[in-house]
């Protein structure tokens, strides 16, 4: 009987799944599968996810290079440890001699004891026989007693003979056994030696000698006290290799877990692809909170034998889970990475902007829309450089007005002056007040009205895409405390009130506020304002309290302490990208003075093209052209004509003949007669006096008269 089956309708999902298992993986493109076994073909994914984890990069050339580099470090360190060991009783010479002595003792064996016992028995039996014989040889002993004594003497004699035989046999036995063991030991040394010399000459002999010495060293491994050499005290700092057992010991020694507890590793201890660190994810034993490990950062670093800056413990995706990263060297001490703004044409500030690089070497980008920031740290920690990451990006978005105030009266924002809508580089509280008042009474109401027009209470990227009037704005207040110290109480209170209102209400209306401070404490940033600044960057601080002032209460105790950052780690800070974000050690991109100038030159061009340069920043001729008026165009061309004839110092010519101006206008495509020019630029009688020009005296126009005409007709000045 046969059973007929109907052909099944093909199921595409099933076919795809089976195809993954059955087709030759080499023909298929490698998917984004990161965890695969080492012993399955390279592109075969771990479909069931139950194979040992081997990161993909491990088989790449970078992976091999990274491992080779670490291997080299480990070899050097192992050699140094070996040299240190040689002076101790665990040294290999001591081991070889101990091994030889032990071999000799083994050859001698325990037969000596049996011989000594047999000898002792012989001596005893002979003494017994002598005593019995002496008793028997006495005279005047009755017959019966004489018989008994003879019997005793004969028995003692027999015993003495037996003991002597046993003694002789023990000696013979010992000789045989020792001979056999001696032969075995000698053969074990001599045979390989002979074979080595026979097969490979002197080299073979050397190899065989080496092997014999190694064998003796092995036999003599244990000291007389019975101790074995162990690398028990090796720490990560000594070896550069992180092992599973080492990790558990570390957390036990740091008293994060009990001595009987173990960690549950979710990934193996793995060297990162760039060879810079080891990473592992593990669970603490049940009931131990993550915070306990994070708080014990110093103890964990000590147990690992590394600097606290090399250790990074991050919270995993559930309580009790830790993502550990141990850097091989102090991170962030090399040259800073090239800032990405150098390679972009322009920026859209509505999108995330690049701020820096994290410990893993990944770019950290932040969306600043509806956010505000607080950057703090000791002088020279890198706040201005960090603030530049935002300011330079904002500069490259030509739609963004910049309001920049520096309470320290330093030179940090001077390069931005030309493109800033309003700025204060003198630390003048009155000017800051003026800027804040402008934002509060002009910017914010305009923005609110615009949002209302769009039927919303917010300005969004979608609105900006449709309506050119919708934009973001940036307000920087560097060193608030200096303004506070320089202002009287009334001005200070007013500044504080306005800043709070701007941060609170400007957020939704596209105003991004960034505060920076050298001395993070309650005075330097009023707490009412501090609490609403969502992005925090704590650069190196002098105390944990200062670090907490920037990041929030309790962060230092939980292991996020900006005091741990070294002085040499400039531009490095604990970065919190918004509310509730996990703090992350990040080094800001750094743009030196030349790079800042280069970016700002581009920003100026972008803004000039977009007509968003602040009034006064554009040359007068450009502003005239922007009016779209025929007479303004002629006046702009006239100003150009004076510029073309500038003197050696670059100052425009003060006076030019009318014929030269007409010629320039004609060359610029403007048909203007001498009369028309005279009507446009009205001269005084004094202006009409002839002046010397290339050997003759001619009529002409002073530049000041053209400027006056511009002012009178278009209310524009230089
Ligand atoms: N991200 C960085 N990478 C490398 N070096 C940096 C970085 N940031 C800052 N530096 C170095 O640190 C120096 C000081 O930086 P910066 O002026 O930004 O510090 P600051 O905290 O603003 O100081 P102050 O409070 O005195 O203004 C810079 O001149 C630069 O050499």
Image (tube, helix red, strand yellow):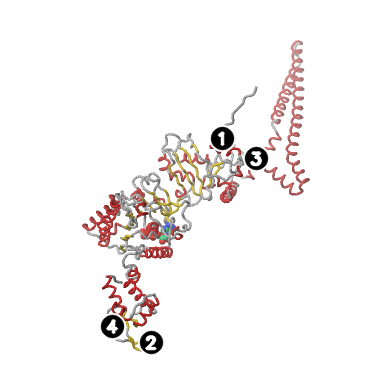
| Residue at the disc numbered 4 | 687
Q: Earlier in the sequence, mark 4 or mark 2?
A: 4
Q: Nearer the viewer, residue 94 or 126?
A: 94
Quadrant in which residue 438 is drawn: bottom left
Q: Which element carries disc 4, helix, strand or loop?
A: loop
Percent from the top left, x then y, of residue 249? 50, 39
Residue 516 visible in the displayed image: no
Q: Is residue 231 left or right of residue 505?
A: right
Q: In which quadrant of the rendered image does the C terminus lie?
A: bottom left
Mark 4 vs mark 3, CA separation in Å: 111 Å
Q: Earlier in the sequence, mark 2 or mark 1?
A: 1
Mark 4 vs mark 2, CA separation in Å: 19 Å
Do callouts 4 and 2 mark residues in contact (Cβ within 8 Å)? Answer: no
Q: Nearer the viewer, residue 120 or 317?
A: 317
| Residue at the disc numbered 2 | 694
Does the beta carbon of the residue at mark 3 sit less than 8 Å from ligand 1?
no
Q: Is residue 293 left or right of residue 184?
A: left
Q: Which residue is at a point 78% across and 45% down the rendered structure image? A: 198
Percent from the top left, x then y, of residue 191? 76, 41
Mark 2 vs mark 1, CA separation in Å: 96 Å
Do callouts 3 and 1 mark residues in contact (Cβ within 8 Å)? Answer: no
Percent from the top left, x then y, of residue 425? 31, 64
Mark 2 vs mark 3, CA separation in Å: 106 Å
| Residue at the disc numbered 3 | 218
């Amino acid at each position: 009987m046969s059973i007929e089956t109907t052909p099944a309708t093909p199921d595409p999902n099933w076919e795809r799944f089976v195809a993954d298992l059955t087709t030759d993986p080499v023909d298929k493109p490698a998917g984004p599968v990161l965890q695969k076994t080492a012993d399955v073909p390279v592109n075969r994914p771990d479909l069931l996810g139950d194979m040992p984890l081997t990161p993909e990069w491990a088989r790449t050339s970078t992976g091999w290079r990274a491992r080779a580099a670490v291997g080299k470090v480990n070899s050097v360190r192992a050699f140094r440890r070996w040299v240190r060991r040689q002076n101790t009783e665990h040294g290999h010479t001591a081991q070889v001699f101990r091994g030889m002595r032990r071999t000799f003792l083994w050859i001698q064996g325990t037969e000596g004891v049996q011989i000594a016992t047999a000898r002792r028995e012989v001596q005893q039996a002979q003494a017994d026989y002598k005593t019995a014989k002496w008793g028997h040889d006495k005279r005047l002993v009755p017959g019966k007693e004489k018989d008994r004594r003879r019997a005793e003497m004969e028995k003692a004699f027999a015993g003495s003979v037996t003991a002597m035989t046993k003694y002789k046999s023990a000696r013979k036995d010992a000789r045989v056994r020792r001979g056999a063991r001696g032969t075995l030991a000698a053969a074990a040394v001599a045979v390989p030696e002979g074979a080595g010399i026979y097969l490979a000459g002197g080299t073979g002999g050397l190899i065989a000698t080496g092997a014999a010495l190694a064998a003796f060293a092995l036999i003599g491994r244990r000291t007389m006290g019975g101790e074995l050499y162990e690398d028990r005290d090796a720490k990560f700092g000594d070896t550069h290799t992180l092992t599973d057992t080492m990790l558990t010991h570390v957390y036990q020694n740091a008293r994060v877990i009990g001595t009987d507890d173990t960690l549950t590793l979710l990934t193996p201890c793995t060297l990162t692809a760039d060879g810079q660190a080891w990473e592992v994810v593990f669970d603490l034993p049940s009931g131990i909170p993550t915070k306990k490990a994070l708080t014990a950062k110093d103890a964990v670093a000590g147990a690992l034998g590394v600097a606290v800056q090399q250790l990074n413990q991050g919270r995993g995706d559930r309580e009790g889970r830790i993502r550990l990263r141990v850097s091989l060297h102090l991170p962030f001490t090399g040259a800073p990475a090239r800032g990405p703004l150098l390679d972009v044409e322009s920026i859209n500030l509505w999108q995330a902007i690049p701020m820096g690089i994290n410990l893993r070497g990944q770019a950290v980008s932040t969306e600043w829309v509806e956010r505000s920031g607080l950057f703090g740290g000791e002088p020279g920690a890198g706040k201005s450089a960090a603030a530049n990451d935002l300011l330079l990006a904002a500069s490259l978005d030509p739609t963004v007005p910049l309001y920049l105030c520096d309470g320290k009266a330093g030179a940090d924002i001077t390069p931005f002056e030309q493109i800033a809508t309003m700025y204060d580089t003198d630390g003048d509280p009155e000017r800051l007040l003026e800027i804040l008042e402008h934002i509060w009474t002009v910017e914010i109401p305009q923005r609110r009205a615009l949002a209302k027009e769009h039927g919303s209470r917010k300005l969004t990227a979608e609105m900006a895409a449709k309506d050119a009037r919708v934009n973001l704005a940036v307000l920087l207040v560097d060193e608030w405390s200096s303004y506070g110290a320089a202002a009287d109480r009334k001005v200070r209170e007013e500044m504080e009130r306005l800043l709070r209102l701007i941060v609170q209400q400007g957020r939704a209306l596209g105003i991004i506020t960034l505060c920076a401070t050298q001395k993070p404490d309650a005075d330097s940033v009023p707490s009412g304002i501090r609490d609403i600044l969502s992005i925090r960057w704590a650069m190196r601080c002098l105390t944990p309290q200062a670090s907490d002032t920037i990041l929030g209460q309790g962060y230092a105790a939980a292991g996020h302490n900006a005091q741990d950052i070294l002085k040499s780690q400039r531009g490095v800070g604990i970065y919190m990208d918004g509310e509730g974000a996990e703090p992350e050690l990040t080094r800001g991109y750094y743009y030196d003075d030349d790079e800042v100038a280069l970016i700002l030159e581009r920003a100026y061009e972008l803004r000039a093209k977009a007509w968003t340069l602040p009034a006064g920043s554009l040359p007068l001729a450009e502003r005239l052209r922007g009016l779209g008026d025929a007479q303004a165009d002629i006046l702009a061309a006239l100003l150009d004509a004076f510029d073309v004839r500038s003197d050696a110092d670059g100052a425009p010519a003060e006076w030019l003949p009318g014929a030269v101006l007409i010629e320039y206008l004609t060359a610029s495509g403007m048909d203007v007669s001498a009369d028309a020019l005279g009507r446009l630029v009205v001269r005084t009688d004094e202006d009409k006096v002839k002046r010397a020009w290339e050997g003759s005296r001619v009529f002409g126009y002073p530049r000041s008269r053209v400027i006056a005409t511009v002012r009178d007709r278009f209310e524009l000045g230089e």
